[in-house]
Image: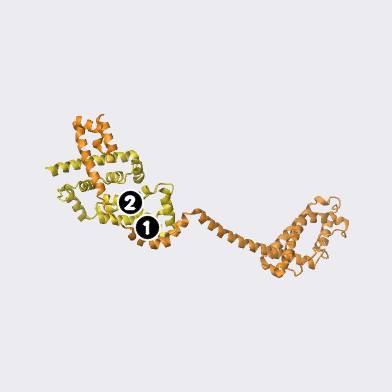
Chain colours: A yellow, B orange
Amino acid sequence: MTSEIVLLVQQIQTGSVESARALTERFQGEVFGVCYRMLGQRQDAEDVVQEVFLRVFKHLDKWDIKRPFKPWLFTIAVNRCRTYLEKRAKMPLFNEEIIHLATSPCEQLQGELGEELQLALESLREEYRTCFILYHQQDLNCAEIGDILDRPEGTIKTWLHRARKELAEWLTRRGIETGA
Amino acid sequence: MNCNEFEQQLDIHIGKRPLGAIVELAGHASQCEQCLEIWNGAIHLEESLSQWNRDVPEIDIVESVISQIKGDLHQALPSIAAMSQPDLFFSRQAMRKNEEVTSSEKNSVLAVVAVVLMLATGLFLFPSSNPRPIEKSPVVVMEKTSDISEDHSTSPEIKSFAKDAGIAYFSLAQHAADVFADASLFVPDSGKMQIPNLLQTKDIPLPLNGLIDAIESDIKPIQSDLRKAIDFLLMSTPDQTS
């Protein structure tokens, strides 16, 4: 697996378009998963995923061949999502939409547990959300997440615990409301 | 199991294996009202997680990405590749350096050959019949040091004279190297030349023997160098002329 990726990267560095295609195909789903869950919108996530791969190809020489590729790739993806979220937060219209969604019961979301969770995630602090997504969606362990976010493993465990607690509370509250 | 252990176990297993299947957790939740609330929230989260993980849509951005990087792959990436292959990069640099050194070495060799040829030509034209440095200098030496025949080997003036001769030789060589760059003009036609003995001391009067010995000791290395250079030229001349 690792040697296969190393080979692909080396071929890309010599100008192989086919290897670039293979690498994109191999990781686009996982990167999109992270971006989609962090941003909550498909179109935004697609834009960011493209940006992530363009950056990856541009900075391939900065990847340490001795370290696993996936955490390096996810570091870029998470950073791009953060930047995108910062930009989006400055858009007044979008902020109003989010506040409206978060404070009023949405008929479309009622009964859709997955979408309820996504909505709950968007209300979390960005660090908690990122940890939760990387742990529960990408199956990374706390040490790997620590590498990506440049934080100690203990901090990641704490963030994960708090994220779950807040999400569970949100879901319980929404469950009571919808059930009423 | 106490409440702390219950929460720790929940953190470990949630989303990884079905919570309901863990008998100890369910048992503790049924006995502890505070933990029951946490348990219910965890079960709710677990159900949401399984659906949330299935909800990610498919995506295909491959062609879009490739179309954007195609130009870069042919222009920018090869330079990245060159930077990331230090051995290749440095070997190219070394090759360039070697090429420069080689050409400068060639020029130096040509200059030395020119000097040697010039000197050799001079020696052939004026073999030992040119005793000027030997005749003139001893007169001066004889006047100043009358005991030269007794202690000729250690006389500082003789040594000084020999050294000056050596310095003059190197200055001349340097100057000639600068002036005559093209060695081929000075290559003799014949490849079988006899190198005369530059230091014949038989006919020189006895009082001058010490002086001659001193000069000889300092000039011998020069003579040896000249012989080597001339031998080399004699060997290489037929090839060049043909």
Host chain of mark 1: A
Give left or right: position of A148 versus B141: left
| Disc 1 residue type (three-letter) | Arg
User: Which quadrant: the N terminus of chain B?
Assistant: top left
Q: Earlier in the sequence, mark 2 or mark 1?
A: 1
Of residues B65 and B53, the one nearer the viewer is B53
Residue placed at 20% from the left, 51% from the top?
A: A98
How many residues crowd around disc 2 within 10 Å: few (fewer than 14), some, or many (20 or more)? many
Q: Nearer the viewer, mark 2 or mark 1?
A: 1
Give left or right: position of B168 versus B130: left
Whether residue B161 can be seen here:
no
| Disc 2 residue type (three-letter) | Ala
Write down the quadrant of residue B96 in the picture. Answer: bottom right
Of residues A55 and B151, the one nearer the viewer is A55
How many residues crowd around disc 1 within 10 Å: few (fewer than 14), some, or many (20 or more)? some
Give left or right: position of B241 versus A32: right
- The answer to whether residue A46 is above or below residue B47 is below
- The answer to whether residue A111 is above or below residue B119 is above
Residue under pointer 2? A77
Residue under pointer 1? A21
Residue found farthest to the front: B21
User: Which percent across, then down, holds residue A18?
Assistant: 40, 59
